[in-house]
Image (cartoon, rainbow, N blue to C red):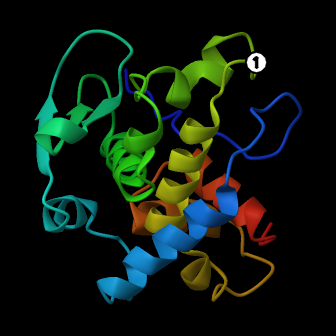
């Protein structure tokens, strides 16, 4: 069984206060511009490597999706029971921690709660930290840039969101929330 529940919507009550979503989007846009990326899918593996980070992918038991190890300049991604779309989002999320310099502010938590907490905690959003929300926002904007999404003809034709998810190599859920954010649905 694969688990594709990686993107948390940015609307709803009870979220951690202080998440800098706008900054996270700006930083993702900066990366897109810096590397002159023009079309999907974004090569997130290349971006990680270009930042001087080593990517380690491995199958390990447990809930941890990924982890940034800044002292080792390493991004770890758990591949166990996770689709390519989920792994790509995890890579974008960890790169977000790096780009946003979260490791300078606080000790980074293992990214298990940041990806699944709202779903596995009975729908409650307690405990969602602002740095996890920021990293998710960065990943969404990096993998599905608003400037690309907004070129789609509105209203989207039936099935187009599914086609876009495949084109961008992201989960249906992640694409849905990005389309909602940009008022494309």
* Front-most of residues 98 and 145: 98
Give the crowd class for mark 1: few <14, some 14-19, many >=20 residues within 10 Å: few
Residue 159 at least partly seen = no
Residue situated furthest front in the rendering: 104
Q: Quadrant of the N terminus?
A: top left
* Front-most of residues 136 and 5: 136
Specify whether 28 is left or right of 20: left
Provide the secondary structure element on which disc 1 rests: loop
What number of labels is visible?
1
Q: Residue at x 16, y 68 (%)?
A: 50
* Front-most of residues 141 and 175: 141
| Residue 148 position within the rendered picture, expressed as x and y whole percent measured from the top left | 55, 83
| Residue 22 position within the rendered picture, expressed as x and y whole percent measured from the top left | 68, 65
Q: Quadrant of the C terminus?
A: bottom right
Residue 93 at least partly seen = yes
Q: Is residue 64 above or below residue 56?
A: above
Q: Is residue 15 above or below residue 22?
A: above
Q: Residue at x 78, y 32 (%)?
A: 15
Name the residue that disc number 1 marks. 123
Specify whether 73 is left or right of 143: left
Residue situated furthest right in the rendering: 13
Q: Residue at x 35, y 20 (%)?
A: 64
Q: Residue at x 78, y 37 (%)?
A: 17
Specify whether 111 is left or right of 34: right
* Front-most of residues 119 and 24: 24
Specify whether 64 is left or right of 75: right
| Residue 167 position within the rendered picture, expressed as x and y whole percent measured from the top left | 42, 69
| Residue 159 position within the rendered picture, expressed as x and y whole percent measured from the top left | 64, 64
């Amino acid at each position: 069984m694969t688990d594709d529940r990686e993107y948390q919507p940015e609307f709803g009550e009870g979220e951690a206060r202080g998440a800098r979503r706008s900054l996270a989007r700006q930083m993702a846009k900066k990366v897109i511009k810096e590397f002159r990326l023009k079309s999907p899918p974004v090569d997130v593996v290349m971006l990680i490597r270009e930042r001087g980070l080593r990517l380690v992918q491995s199958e390990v038991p447990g809930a941890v999706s990924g982890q940034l190890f800044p002292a080792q300049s390493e991004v770890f991604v758990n591949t166990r029971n996770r689709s390519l779309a989920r792994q790509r989002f995890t890579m974008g999320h960890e790169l977000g921690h790096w780009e946003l310099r979260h490791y300078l502010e606080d000790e980074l938590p293992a990214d298990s709660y940041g990806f699944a907490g709202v779903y596995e905690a009975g729908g409650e959003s307690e405990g969602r930290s602002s740095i996890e929300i920021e990293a998710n926002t960065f990943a969404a904007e990096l993998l599905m840039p608003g400037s690309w999404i907004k070129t789609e003809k509105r209203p989207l034709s039936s099935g187009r969101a599914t086609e876009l998810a495949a084109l961008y190599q992201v989960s249906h859920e992640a694409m849905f929330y990005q389309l909602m954010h940009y008022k494309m649905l």
